Image: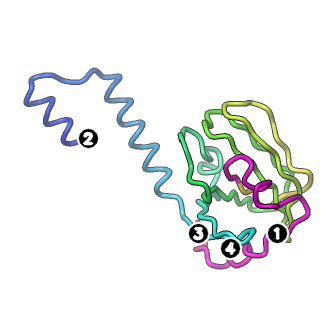
Amino acid sequence: MTAAFHVCRRAGRWPAAPAIVLVLGLLLCAGAAAELPVAELNLADRVLTVEIAATPETMSRGLMFRDSMPEHHGMLFIWPRDQMVAMWMKNTRIPLSVAFIDRDFRILNIARMEPHSLEIHPSAGAARYALELNQGWFERHGVTAGDSIDGLGRLLSELPEDP
């Protein structure tokens, strides 16, 4: 941002206000994603790198506005109590699958979600967690409803108090 500012100043031109707002917005979006805690989760003989969304703000934003995600990466949502939850794909560009998980780390159900869809994908019961991965990841690795995610307990125990 600073380099662009100096180039414009030396050239005697100033970028239009909308361009400045756009650049600032993109920088803020990138910064928000980079600030999320990251942890490793073992699932289906793979090590996943997951970003932790545990605040209302990070859970509301989720994976919105991203153009891609590496194959074994995802986002883990953590609710403070067991509850019926639902996900949608507003402003989300990546096709995703979400596994809703109960407090005993058992998968309640898995939903396939399409980019930019406003379709609501509910949990099949009271969930405490949800794990979003690239669409089809669970199927490709033989993970289904009823499976336990044993590594989730270890991951949670290693998180700081306020992720």
- Marks 2/1: CA–CA distance: 44 Å
For disc 2, the marked residue is 1
Residue sitting at x 66%, y 74%:
155
Residues at marks 4 and 1, CA–CA distance in whole angstroms: 11 Å
Protein image colouring: rainbow
- Amino acid bearing label 4: Leu
Residue placed under numbered mark 4 in the picture = 156
Q: Which mark is residue 149?
A: none
Closer to the camera: disc 4 or disc 3?
3
Which numbered disc covers residue 105? 1
Q: Residue at x 55, y 65 (%)?
A: 38
**Whole-number angstrom distance, CA of label 4 to CA of label 3:** 9 Å
Residue 128 screen position, x and y as percent = 80, 61
In what element is the residue under mark 4?
helix
**In the picture, residue 112 is in which quadrant?**
top right
Nearest to N terminus: mark 4 or mark 2? 2
Mark 3 and mark 2 in contact? Answer it, CB < 8 Å: no
Is residue 23 shown above or below 139? above
Residue 70 colored magenta? Answer: no
Mark 1 and mark 4 in contact (Cβ < 8 Å)?
no
| Between 109 and 144, the one nearer to me in the picture | 144
The answer to whether marks 3 and 1 mark residues whose Cβ atoms lie closer than 8 Å is no
Residue holding disc 3: 39
